[in-house]
Amino acid sequence: MKVLVINCGSSSLKYQLIDSDSEAVLAKGLCERITIDGSVLTHSPAGKDKVIIEQPMPDHTAAVKLVLNQLTDSVHGVITSLSEIGAVGHRVVHGGEKFASSTLITDKVIAAIEECNDLAPLHNPANLIGIHACEECMPGVPMVAVFDTAFHQTMPKQAYLYGLPYEYYEKDKVRRYGFHGTSHSFVSKRAIELLKLDRNNSKVIVCHLGNGASICAVKNGESVDTSMGLTPLEGLIMGTRSGDIDPAIIDYIAKKEGLSLDEVMNVLNKKSGVAGLSKVSSDFRDLAEAAESGNELAETTLKVYAYHVAKYIGAYVAAMNGVDAICFTAGVGENNSQVRSMICEYLGYLGIVMDEEANKVRGEELMLSTQDSKVKVMVIPTNEELAIARETVALVK
Ligand code: ADP
């Protein structure tokens, strides 16, 4: 079956057409500046030249139509007819406590996703727009929602409750939800498979280190804790997000700097993290370059970053009373051997012995620890689109 995977943002739409039998990506692309002047589609069909189409996309339906035209185009296309698309898988950011797994999209499901909009006001409404646009362009094609939060619904109360008045949980659903669930699930499953662990007796820590970053403790195949919380702002230091801070800093900065609450939140989300701390960039390639050329603040930033990741790993070893494997994934985790080394330097107490030669490789599945290392350290490239396609097929078949 051919599955169209859609990740819809407020002004962007990413897609991949995946053949679920061979798991090959037939085409992928990105619509940008939807609803804004200067809309552009970049379409990359497998084995053919990339095309860039600048054409107005006044709404997401126009974007989906343009994508479908490209997929069936006589020159840039990869299928001859839309009827070849057997299902659509949508990434949906927040499923609240309503969704503990992926689900076939029905009117009832759409209404339940809408009820989670408050929890992800920037993302869920955009995801729903993508669902409606596909419904309009491909009536009758089954669609599946795959939630970033669903994998973490197995967390126990001690992991998901905050030390706040309980009524905020009861009334307003304030709790840890966690994100990147599709990635944590994909990578932990692969680790269990590669290491031939007994799923029901396994302890894996997944470090998803990208622009957004989170860690997950996966015990017996289920998420038991994760670093992102009610929103993706909590946890690790990220590209531009602060991660954990003393909550009193919000009030302190607002008063000191004369900023409104919205402005402080904007700083925490968009101007903090390694970008804010280093004054260089949110991109770890720029940071590494700056540190190498003697920028001390960039070097310190990398140290702070690695230290925070290592502290979380320690916390999750405690949460699971042990660990079999630690997996690195996403842009930084898959490619940045320096950061991986800096993190693992803290982990000798676990009996980890790193194979520094192996650690020089980037971007592919590999074992970073030596054969006699008590805990295995690995790189497992994530593939959220493939995970969404698999979930979609499983529910549609
Ligand atoms: P997002 O959360 O936006 O999906 P990514 O997973 O793409 O983010 O991660 C982005 C980060 O990964 C950047 O900081 C970038 O420096 C790093 N990265 C991506 N590719 C490489 C690479 N080939 N070498 C080193 N770092 C990389």
Image (cartoon, rainbow, N blue to C red):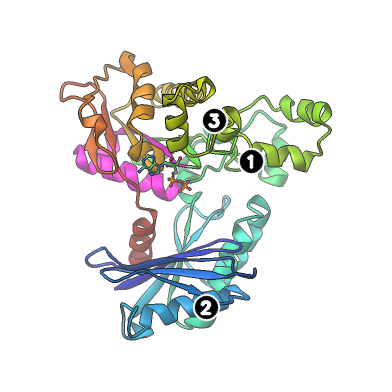
> Tag 3's secondary structure?
helix
The one of 100 and 317 positioned closer to us in this rendering: 317
Residue 325 occupies which quadrant of the picture?
Answer: top left
Q: Earlier in the sequence, mark 2 or mark 3?
A: 2
- Residue beneath disc 2: 135
Q: In which quarter of the image is ligand 1?
A: top left
> Tag 2's secondary structure?
helix
- Placement of 368 over or under 116, stated as above or below: above
Q: Which of marks 2 and 1 is nearer the N terminus?
A: 2
Q: In this view, does 327 lie to the left or right of 225?
A: left
Distance between mark 2 and mark 1 Cα atoms: 33 Å
Q: Does the magenta stretch include residue 206?
A: yes
Q: Give the range drawn in magenta.
A: 181-210
- Which of pointers 1 and 3 indicates the residue nearer the eye? 1
Q: Which of marks 1 and 3 is nearer the N terminus?
A: 3
Give amino acid for label 1. Answer: Asn
Within 8 Å of ligand 1, the CB of disc 1?
A: no
- Residue beneath disc 3: 158
Q: Where is residue 80 in the image (x, y as percent from the top left)?
A: 31, 85
> Tag 1's secondary structure?
helix
Identify the residue shown where x is 46% and y is 82%: 140
Q: Position of residue 193 (x, y in %)?
A: 22, 43
- Residue beneath disc 1: 269
Within 8 Å of ligand 1, the CB of disc 2?
A: no
